[in-house]
């Protein structure tokens, strides 16, 4: 039986951080065992917020090198940049004609981002979920690994797919979300009630970047905001800082919360923080080693991107053509 198709995307805005790794990338690697995966660096989504062009390109290459180092199998699966595959923009246009302003206005991410970027509420920011729907629907995707913050967008993708199919027959597969387990929702180290985000201030100790020096990782964990009762206990409401650290430690070591509580009974926060940092550093070590080997090899990375774009192009062709035919574009 043919393997189910998985699609997911990650933005190259900012440097990849621990939340991306534990919340998404590790899961992407695991899914490769059982599914046929398309993983996309969604640079077209990134420009909905103003980027420095040089930084965007650098970040995208860093991210590609990181994804490969973390174990994405670009030979067996498809790894590519969104902007290299025309079908994303082509299908997004078609789908935008089947998406209502009202639906897009209700997207909480749009509301948040337009508040955050008041000076640049562009049309792309508004139609962002349509492009995301195109990404997914192009490939006959069945499963979409995403974080909780993207479920509303996925729900809209499903609505658009079903609407289109209703009008024109079965062109698209209606995708399902594959929600990463909540255990790997990583919060900021300085603001443990908010998700760790690579768009946060890079100078703050809130975010652990995957390419941080081990020394800096250790420092950030040591400075992590906690509470004053000095017991390592999982209680997200009451003790968001410590609970976040327990979560991270659990994700990295595979130990469960009660074992961690026992392990650090009476140990105090200082010792625990160091243990978390060390566990994270040793998890990242082999990845960083590989990253340092390949990051400078521009030709190697370019070849992967070229091959990925070709494979994605070919994989998208059939559905793209069906969608164009469905709406009545001249077929040749
Ligand atoms: N919007 C997603 C995010 O910011 C990234 C993304 C773009 C994506 N296209 C996608 C995720 C398609 C899953 C499927 O996290």
Image (tube, rainbow, N blue to C red):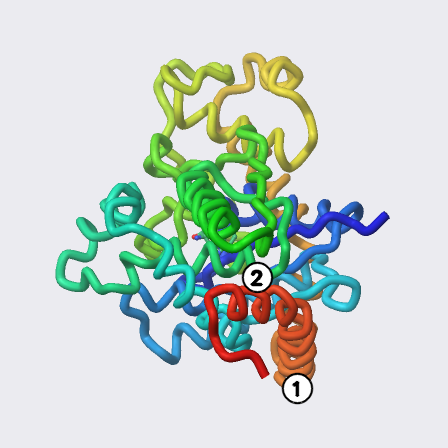
* Position of 195 relative to 161 (above/below): above
**Circle 1: is it few (<14), some (14-19), or many (20+) Cα within 10 Å?**
few
Q: Nearer the viewer, mark 1 or mark 2?
A: 2
Q: Position of residue 3 (x, y in %)?
A: 79, 50
Q: Quadrant of residue 71?
A: bottom right
Q: Position of residue 193 (x, y in %)?
A: 34, 30
SS type, badge 1: helix
View extreme (left): residue: 119
* Position of 192 relative to 79 (above/below): above
Residue 286 in sight in this render: no
> In terms of depth relative to the viewer, which is nearer, 183 or 118?
118
Q: CA distance from mark 1 to mark 2?
A: 28 Å
View extreme (right): residue: 1
Which quarter of the image is occupied by the C terminus? bottom right
Mark 1 and mark 2 lie on one chain; the one further toward the N terminus is: 2
Q: How many marks?
A: 2
Residue at 58% from the left image edge and 56% from the top image edge: 171
SS type, badge 2: loop
Q: Is mark 1 within 8 Å of ligand 1?
A: no
* Disc 1: which residue: 299
* Disc 2: which residue: 138
Residue at 45% from the left image edge and 68% from the top image edge: 43
């Amino acid at each position: 039986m043919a393997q189910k198709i998985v699609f997911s995307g990650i933005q190259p805005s900012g440097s990849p951080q621990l939340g991306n790794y534990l919340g998404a990338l590790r899961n992407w690697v695991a899914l490769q065992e059982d599914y046929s995966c398309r993983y996309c660096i969604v640079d077209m989504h990134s420009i909905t917020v103003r980027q420095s062009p040089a930084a965007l390109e650098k970040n995208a290459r860093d991210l590609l090198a990181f994804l490969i180092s973390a174990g994405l199998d670009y030979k067996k699966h498809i790894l590519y940049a969104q902007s290299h595959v025309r079908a994303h923009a082509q299908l997004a246009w078609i789908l935008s004609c089947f998406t209502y302003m009202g639906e897009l206005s209700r997207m909480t991410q749009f509301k948040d981002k337009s508040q955050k970027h008041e000076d640049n509420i562009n049309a792309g920011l508004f139609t962002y979920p349509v492009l995301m729907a195109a990404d997914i629907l192009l490939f006959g995707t069945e499963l979409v690994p995403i974080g909780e913050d993207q479920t509303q967008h996925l729900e809209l993708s499903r609505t658009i797919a079903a609407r289109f199919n209703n009008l024109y027959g079965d062109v698209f597969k209606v995708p399902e979300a594959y929600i990463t387990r909540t255990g790997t929702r990583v919060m900021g180290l300085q603001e443990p009630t908010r998700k760790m985000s690579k768009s946060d201030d890079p100078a703050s100790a809130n975010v652990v970047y995957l390419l941080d020096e081990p020394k800096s990782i250790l420092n950030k964990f040591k400075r992590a905001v906690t509470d004053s009762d000095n017991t390592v206990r999982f209680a997200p409401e009451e003790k968001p800082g410590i609970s976040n650290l327990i979560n991270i430690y659990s994700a990295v070591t595979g130990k469960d919360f009660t074992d961690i509580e026992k392990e650090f009974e009476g140990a105090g926060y200082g010792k625990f923080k160091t243990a978390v940092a060390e566990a994270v550093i040793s998890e990242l070590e082999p990845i960083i080693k590989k990253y340092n080997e390949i990051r400078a090899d521009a030709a190697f990375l370019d070849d992967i991107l070229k091959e990925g774009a070709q494979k994605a192009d070919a994989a998208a062709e059939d559905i793209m053509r069906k969608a164009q035919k469905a709406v009545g574009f001249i077929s040749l």
